[in-house]
Each structure stands twice: as structure tokens, then as C-alpha cells.
């Protein structure tokens, strides 16, 4: 294992995984989601309590019998078929499945970027379906998106201050002083200092850029944030820092997340409820414990088999079939 050009530890794979000797190796091992599924259990407790006390008026997101078809080369393609799920306020709901399963279509429908052929979607009691972009403007203030790749989602010509501030300018929220305060609060929420305000994204690391993207989504003080593979472009140590930030924000601010991912090990660390998608349908839905500990569907079981086991077994086991990238 290398750090700053220096070998920190070397040895047989099984030995390094099961009994790492160096502090750096132990940290890397701790940062791997598959090896530490309960690492953030304490931070997730707030969301678990919200899940256990859910009643009708605590449902932040309601997706009811939503279907979406597209015409491709003259043929009708069903990208989403009869999707239904609810997300209680203050919890994280994960959409998982391999490429082409319909996750991206579901997210676009949830954000109002696509309109379904049938069915309804509401966020915080506000209808998303059947409305024009102009009519959706008020909903978008409370429904924000963090993109997958922090290297392409931020305008490289803008400063960090401009990037985080832009949503406030677009919605004309507050006077200059209030906007300045909100920008600084949002950066502090993601554990970034004010000294970065004048810098541009190219001067930041990948982890810092994704924190900026999260700060940008927070600055409007939304109820719901959709996280589209927010850590897939980051290494495991940086990813661990982002996960901790997200769960801390949820615990402190009561945020509701929709988390889209192909990484089931990461999903287990973050999510309270899960919908497994396959060919445009939800084939299984339940709490994280129900999905991970007692999956009912063969497709779900096949996805779970792609998660590597812990300790020396990681090194000794035969390679498993990798789960396809997000789609």
C-alpha cells in the first residue's frame, strides 16, 4: 500500500486484509463499505427513528403507479413500469439495480425532467406530475440534485462562491448580506473553509468538489436531495468522508435523500429503505434489513452476491461477477 510515494505496508493479500499492521492500511480497510456495513450505525439512528414513527403526513415522497415509455427506432420501450414507493421524511431511500434497470428514468420523473404516461408523483405534498417547468419552479427550490461526477458537474470558470451562490441568485432569495451568510453556512455544513471561496474547481480535490456540489444543493435549504451516484468517481477514503457528511447533515437538518447507486455495500451503510429495479420494474422493496438479510427475489440475491465478503475471505474467494454500472 502506497501513500505519498512511500510503501506503508506489503505482504500477502489475506494477511493485509485480515490483520493490517500500519495505521494507513487499517484506515483504508475501515473505509471499504463492504467490510464495515455498520460503520455509520449511530448516525443512521435518527433516520431509523423517523422510519419507525412514519405516519401519512410524514411521507416526504410518494410515487404511485408511474409508467414511462419512449419510442426508439419506431418501437415502444417501457423504461419505467408501474413504479410505486414512498419515502418517509428524514430517511434515505435507495434505488438500486444494474445498467438499464430504470433508475435514471425514475430520477428524471421524480425531478419533473420527464413526465410519466400515467401515475402520480408528489414531493412534500406538492404534485410533480402534469406541471410545466415554470410551475415546477417552487418545487425545485425544495428538491435538489447532486450529480455523479464532481469533475464535470461544476463550471470550471466559476469560483466556489459563485457556484454555491447561484441557486440563491436564481430564486432571488434574500439581499446580498443574507446570500453571503448562506453560502458560508453551506460550506461550513460540508466542512469546507471560507478560504476556498475565491478558488475555482480545478484547484480542489475530487472530494472537495463533491462537497461543493453538496453545499450548492444545501444553500436553498431543501427538504429533499437526490444523490445520483455521488461517490462513484471518488476513492474509498474520500467516499467515506462524503458519506459521513451526508449522514451528519441528515441527522442535523432532517433531510430526506433518494440515493441512486449500483454499489450495494455503500447502500447498506446509507439507506433505510431500498427499491430493487430490474427492466423498468421494482422487483423488491423493503427496509435495508429485509433486503440485505432476507431477500425474496432471485435477482436481488444475485446482486447481493456481488458484494465481497470481509477479512481474509476477500483475498481467498474466487472473483465474483461484478455488478454493472449505473444506468
Image (spheres, grey):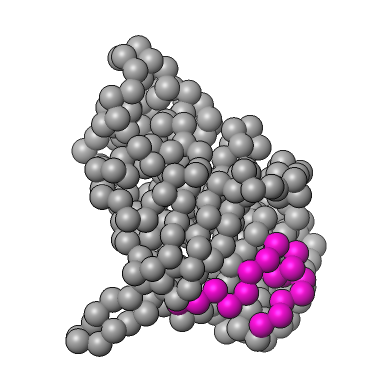
**Residue found at x 69% / y 47%:** 55
Inspect this view and state whether residue 86 appears.
Answer: yes
**Of 138 and 258, which appears nearest the observer?**
138
86 vs 211: above or below: below
Where residue 130 sits: x, y (%)? Answer: 32, 56
234 vs 99: above or below: above
* Horizontal relation, residue 159 to residue 283: left or right: left
**Residue found at x 24% / y 80%:** 71
* Horizontal relation, residue 191 to residue 271: left or right: left
51 vs 159: above or below: below
**Of 317 and 20, which appears nearest the observer?**
317
305 vs 243: above or below: below
Number of dots carrying numbers: 0
**Residue found at x 44% / y 60%:** 120
Quarter of the image with the N terminus is: bottom right
Where residue 62 sits: x, y (%)? Answer: 53, 55
Quarter of the image with the C terminus is: bottom left
Where residue 239 sits: x, y (%)? Answer: 55, 52
Q: Which residue is the extreme one toward the right?
A: 19
The image quarter in which residue 53 lies: top right
**Residue found at x 55% / y 79%:** 322
* Horizontal relation, residue 244 to residue 107: left or right: right
Q: Is residue 312 magenta?
A: no
Inspect this view and state whether residue 237 appears.
Answer: no
* Horizontal relation, residue 251 to residue 213: left or right: right
**Of 265 and 145, which appears nearest the observer?**
145
Magenta residues span 280-297
The image quarter in which residue 255 lies: top right
Where residue 81 sits: x, y (%)? Answer: 45, 76
Amino acid at each position: 500500500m502506497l501513500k505519498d510515494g512511500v510503501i506503508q505496508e506489503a505482504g500477502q493479500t489475506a494477511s493485509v486484509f485480515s490483520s493490517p499492521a500500519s495505521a494507513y492500511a487499517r484506515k483504508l480497510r475501515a473505509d471499504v463499505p463492504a467490510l464495515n456495513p455498520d460503520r455509520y450505525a449511530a448516525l443512521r439512528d435518527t433516520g431509523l427513528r423517523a422510519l419507525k414513527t412514519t405516519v401519512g403526513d410524514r411521507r416526504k415522497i410518494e410515487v404511485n403507479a408511474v409508467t414511462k415509455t419512449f419510442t426508439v427506432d419506431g418501437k415502444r420501450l417501457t423504461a419505467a413500469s408501474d413504479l410505486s414507493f414512498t419515502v418517509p421524511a428524514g430517511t434515505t431511500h435507495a434505488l438500486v439495480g444494474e445498467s438499464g434497470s430504470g433508475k435514471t428514468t425514475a430520477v428524471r420523473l421524480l425531478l419533473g425532467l420527464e413526465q410519466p404516461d400515467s401515475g402520480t408523483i408528489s414531493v412534500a405534498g406538492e404534485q410533480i406530475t402534469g406541471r410545466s417547468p415554470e410551475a415546477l419552479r417552487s418545487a425545485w427550490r425544495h428538491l435538489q440534485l447532486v450529480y455523479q461526477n464532481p469533475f464535470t458537474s461544476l463550471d470550471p470558470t466559476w469560483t466556489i462562491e459563485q457556484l454555491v451562490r447561484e441557486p440563491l441568485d436564481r430564486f432571488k432569495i434574500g439581499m446580498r448580506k443574507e446570500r453571503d451568510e448562506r453560502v458560508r453556512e453551506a460550506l461550513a455544513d460540508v466542512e469546507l473553509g471560507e478560504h476556498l471561496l475565491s478558488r475555482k474547481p480545478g484547484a480542489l480535490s475530487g472530494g472537495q468538489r463533491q462537497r461543493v456540489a453538496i453545499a450548492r444543493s444545501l444553500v436553498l435549504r431543501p427538504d429533499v436531495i437526490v444523490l445520483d451516484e455521488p461517490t462513484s468517481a471518488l476513492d474509498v477514503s474520500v467516499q467515506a468522508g462524503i458519506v459521513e457528511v451526508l449522514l451528519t447533515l441528515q441527522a442535523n437538518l432532517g433531510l430526506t435523500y433518494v440515493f441512486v447507486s449500483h454499489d450495494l455495500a455503500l447502500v447498506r451503510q446509507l439507506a433505510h429503505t431500498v427499491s430493487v429495479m430490474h427492466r423498468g420494474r421494482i422487483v423488491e422493496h423493503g427496509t435495508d434489513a429485509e433486503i440485505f438479510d432476507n431477500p425474496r427475489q432471485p435477482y436481488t440475491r444475485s446482486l447481493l452476491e456481488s458484494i465481497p465478503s470481509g477479512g481474509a475471505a476477500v483475498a481467498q474467494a474466487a472473483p465474483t461477477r461484478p455488478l454493472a454500472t449505473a444506468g
